[in-house]
Image: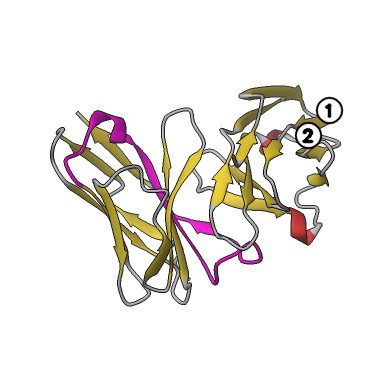
Amino acid sequence: GAGVSQSPSNKVTEKGKDVELRCDPISGHTALYWYRQRLGQGLEFLIYFQGNSAPDKSGLPSDRFSAERTGESVSTLTIQRTQQEDSAVYLCASSFSPGATSEQFFGPGTRLTVL
Amino acid sequence: AQRVTQPEKLLSVFKGAPVELKCNYSYSGSPELFWYVQYSRQRLQLLLRHISRESIKGFTADLNKGETSFHLKKPFAQEEDSAMYYCALENTGGFKTIFGAGTRLFVKA
């Protein structure tokens, strides 16, 4: 079966523009995670969804970041008024259920470059 | 504060030599610990997790609560082990996974 997919694979935008990043999880996976990876750094947890709900949004870097999930499937991460420091690879992962007993499967990532 | 530290950005060993990738964590409770690996041009994937007590591709990792460490070891490195390795912890009862900055392992022929 298909793994986690993300689109676009690459996005170049100008400072101040809004961007939307999409994640399609593995079918049947109830948990979905978003991470950010800046160059030379580890993954930074942003948010996770259990079904369509996000119990903990404290990882979002600022109020310019928002995320939603619909139909317990597709998720969209939106960054408003992008800044150069938003440049990073944004990774999405899904798992059958949340928690350490369920393996997270990662997508290929979206490389965002803010000029 | 919850933190995962991987002190080595790059580790280079010869094929057949033992390898140890260091990971130290800071967490007040009992975390769940993981090692993830990313091979060239591939996705990040789970290598092993503490709760499973498993050995994958010859790698093992032992949790040392006294030293708050979860080092990844393999007795005889292979060229195909060359990759980026990330140590991670998940807080018990929550679903936030915290990653270290990663160690690039290069196994020379």
Residue A30 x, y percent position in the rendering: 47, 73
| Chain letter of disc 2 in the image | B
The C terminus of chain A - image quarter? top left
Q: Name the residue beneath numbered marker 1.
A: B17
Residue, x 62% and y 30% (percent of image)?
B103
Residue A53 x, y percent position in the rendering: 38, 70
Q: Amino acid at mark 2?
A: Ala
Residue A3 x, y percent position in the rendering: 46, 63
Q: Name the residue beneath numbered marker 2.
A: B77
Stretch of the chain drawn in magenta: A80-108
> In the shown orientation, is residue A27 left or right of residue A6?
right
Q: Are marks 2 and 1 in contact (CB under 8 Å)?
A: yes
Residue A105 lies in the magenta-colored region:
yes
Residue, x 13% and y 41% (percent of image)?
A17
| Chain letter of disc 1 in the image | B
Residue, x 79% and y 45% (percent of image)?
B61
Q: Is B36 located above or below residue A84 in the figure?
A: below
Q: As rendered, which of B86 and B16 lies closer to the eye?
A: B86
**Chain-order first, disc 2 or disc 1:** 1
Q: As rendered, which of B78 and B67 lies closer to the eye?
A: B67
